Amino acid sequence: MFFRALLVSLIILFSVTDTAAKNFRWSTQGDAATLDPHSQNETFNNGINALVYEYLISRDRQTFSKFVPGLALSWTNTGPLTWVFKLRQGVKFHDGTPFTADDVVFSFNRARDSTVTFRLYSTQSGIAKKLDDYTVEFTTPVPNPVMLDTIGNIMIMSKTWCEKNGVVKPLDYIKKEESFATRNAMGTGAYRLVAWEQGVKILHKKNPDWWGIKAGLYTGNIETIDYRPVSNAATRMAALKTGELDFVLDPSVQDVLRLRNDPDIKVWEGHEQRLIYLGTDQARDELLYSDVKGKNPFKDKRVRLAMYHAIDINALKTSVMRGLSIPTGIPLPAGLAAGVPAELENRPPFDPAKAKKLLAEAGYPVGFGFTLHCPNDRYVNDEKICVAVAAMWARIGLNVRVETMTKANFFPKVQNRDTSAFLAGWGGGATDAIFILKPVMHSRDGKGAGDSNYGNAKNEELDTLIDKLEGEMNLVERQNMINRATKLMQDEVHVIPLHRQMIPWASRKNVTVLHRPNNLLDLHWVVIK
């Protein structure tokens, strides 16, 4: 009865805004965290904000490997530490004010005050200086071999709008702060925000003044966007089947085979450049959530390696992920695409006996207990992965309590390092290793490095390697450093990599979308027939 009532209520909600072919109704399991584009670096949240805000550059539609103009028309590397960007003229914000170099300088300075990894990206991009109304020069602290990837991580806001509404600095999402920018948005992008009712709906409408329309970039035909977060997978898929939804970004993996054979549904498939991994608190002298008092078992590499040996990665792939994962031993989102040798893909073998022996050698012959914190609405089958891994660890004597929560609660918790062990993911559009090495694997330095190192793991040799390769312009030497850093992370069990997830999308048969490895839906390319 509850399921029927929930489905009926969704039908009513979706039907209210249904206007023939040009209203796009879509859903995933979770909601946006904040509309402030510099406050929370999470892929889905970035995707929602990118409807309104834009970057200086983006990636091409055909290959996703080339950089193309966005709010910047061209760029020139004028010296070892300097880059000059020529901005697009005639662009207006949604309130009609012109976009200029002042907004670019302001946005990069604002992002530098972020409490998440936007701080790092802005710092790596360098100090922005206005040369004239449509020219900006960036001076980087060190040579940046991936400057364009770095620049393309910061969304541009209106300096005037931020000053008018008292949001010149990004809110601290980790502390659950709110500001005018939390629920309001005003950019230059293809869509204007209409309404956000958290947990219920996000509505956008096409921006008729978007510069990309004249440039021929708006190849879709949707006029309005109706997003509804629906946590229950069965409810999402039922709404898609009955036509109350046009698109679901995250169909449950157990439904994919059936959906492939459904004449009313299209399944769009591909891999995502995202590493799913397990991390542990390697800093505290005593774990927060454990029955071990006075010490921290996770500081001992033998314990971490025992946990690694206890994971049956093939069982995870077949039973939990239903084949929709690529097991990996490389703690990088892009895997071999990051240029590392193929032999590094090998994982320590599944060996419970060896795991028990390692635990005994470390002083835990009967194991110990701890809590594993996991999101339940962020990654593909995230909660089920945690439950399965906990069961595997139980076989070697580890008593694991799995605590799951929505991503809205999970990320502030782990960003505050309020955890002993956790499941997380990292990825996006860039294949270069630095985009996980510096924010996730490096220790925290208070300047952006290690901001997403939730376990506070620290290895001085690794930090030194990362710092050197960050500014190394000799690509052969830089790749050697990446390879050494990867091998070091493996040897020290810095984290426990699991897999790179496959990301099936599902739509009605009359809908055409472009599947991309960053798992973001570009709505200005969506066509409804």
Image (cartoon, rainbow, N blue to C red):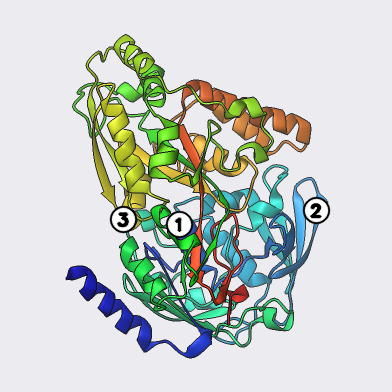
Q: Earlier in the sequence, mark 1 or mark 2?
A: 2
Frontmost of labels 1 and 3 is 1
> 146 and 266: which one is in front?
266
Vertical arrangement, residue 377 with respect to residue 145, above or below: below
Callout 1 secondary element: helix
Observer able to see residue 447: no
* Quadrant in which the N terminus appears: bottom left
Q: Residue furthest top?
A: 361
The residue beneath circle 1 is 256
Q: Position of residue 215 (x, y in %)?
A: 74, 79
Frontmost of labels 3 and 2 is 3
Q: Earlier in the sequence, mark 3 or mark 2?
A: 2
Disc 1 to disc 3, C-alpha distance = 23 Å
Q: Residues within 10 Å of mark 3 (few under 14, many from 20)?
A: some
Is residue 49 found left or right of 470 in the rendered image?
A: left
Q: Position of residue 216 (x, y in %)?
A: 73, 79
Q: Residues within 10 Å of mark 2 (few under 14, many from 20)?
A: few
Is residue 111 found left or right of 318 in the rendered image?
A: right
> 58 and 396: which one is in front?
396
- Kindly identify the amino acid type of the residue bearing the numbered disc 1: Val
The residue beneath circle 2 is 77
Disc 3 to disc 2, C-alpha distance = 43 Å
The residue beneath circle 3 is 406
**Residue at horizontal 51%, vertical 78%?**
186
Q: Position of residue 431 (x, y in %)?
A: 64, 46
**Residue at horizontal 73%, vertical 43%?**
143
